Amino acid sequence: MNIKVSMPSNIALVKYMGKSDVQRNQAANHSISLTLPQFQSTCEVNPSNEDQWINHPHTPLSHAEQNKVFRHIKMLKSFFQYDQGVQITCYNNFPKGVGIASSASSMAAITQACAQLMAQQPIPTHQLARLSQQGSGSSCRSFYHPIAVWQDEHIKAIDCPFDLFHQVVLLDSEQKKVSSSQAHQIISQSKELPDRIQRANRRVEQLLQAIQARDWETMRQVSIADSKDMHTLLEQHGIHYRTEASHVFFKQLDLFQKEHRLPIMTTMDAGPNIHLIGQTHHKDLMDAFFKKFQHYKVL
């Protein structure tokens, strides 16, 4: 019995950083994300005599990462009262460990695939999301689209009032030196975290109001401010995902935006690469920017 499942990545428009409950991967603050259907992780799982991870050549896992998967599988087997082993592999159609939330999409795919194999009946989405969250906090958002809102114990999907496009400017394809999990651990101990929580929660409310009001400019400004806020906090603790290359790109884009009145939302996850989000009628202008700066690789 071969189960094959694909799940999307997501990019937070207001980030969560730090955990209020490490054991359950409970976020310290509220967050809101855009689901990215073009970036998928695919998981294949089969019954086996023992639990076995098969590394895929495109997205191999380290020994530590494999142990994290096995811990998650052990939890799922206990939850579903499944007493067989599983043979499992997972791979992405995008680079791993570079700030495109591969851990979120892969853990969501692993959870979904294992649930299909182990469960005796269909599992509600909210339950799958909560199970997946225990393996990767932000993976719970990948079960909802087009926009996911995660507030404390509650997560839900809301509609997007705009027809959007999303691109990633790939400045660095090497895996980041500080993982998202490590960053969460460090920030969870920060004396600056309580203020960050207040700011992020306030921005989630502002963003929800802007979405309801169809106010793209406020959405854009709130998300950009939150990305800068999170990375400033990380840098205060020695975690530098923003690089000289990203600073150069932002300067070039800012000049182009002012000249052409291009209202693009920019954000960075825990990684060196830049996410661009805009309304589809601005896509031609964005293409013109990349025609001018042809050295950038865009996903």
Image (cartoon, rainbow, N blue to C red):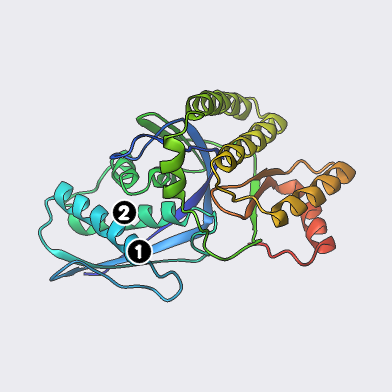
For this rendering, which residue is in front, 271 or 146? 271
Res. 43 mark: 1
**Residue 34 shown left or right of residue 142 in the figure:** right
Horizontal side of 249 relative to 141 (left or right) equals right
- The crowding category of the residue bearing disc 1, from other C-alpha atoms within 10 Å (few below 14, some 14 to 19, many at least 20), is many
195, 274: nearer the viewer: 195
Q: Residue at x 58, y 27 (%)?
A: 203
Q: Are marks 2 and 1 in contact (CB under 8 Å)?
A: yes
- SS at mark 2 in the image: helix
Q: Residues within 10 Å of mark 2 (few under 14, many from 20)?
A: many
Q: Assign the C terminus to one quadrant of the image.
A: bottom right
Is 173 placed above or below 223 here? below
In terms of depth relative to the viewer, which is nearer, 186 or 61? 186
Above or below, comparing residue 133 to residue 150 in the picture: below
Looking at the image, how many numbered discs can be counted on the residues? Answer: 2
Q: Residue at x 75, y 53 (%)?
A: 249
Residue 75 place in picture, x, y as percent: 20, 50
Q: Position of residue 280 (x, y in %)?
A: 71, 48
Position in image of residue 140 (x %, y %): 39, 43
- Please name the amino acid that badge 2 sits on: Gln
Q: Which mark is residue 112?
A: 2
Determine the image quadrant of residue 64.
bottom left
Quadrant of residue 118 within the rendered picture: bottom left
Q: Can residue 113 be seen in this snapshot? A: no
- At horizontal 42% and vertical 31% (from top left) the residue drawn is 28
- Mark found first going from the N terminus, 2 or 1: 1
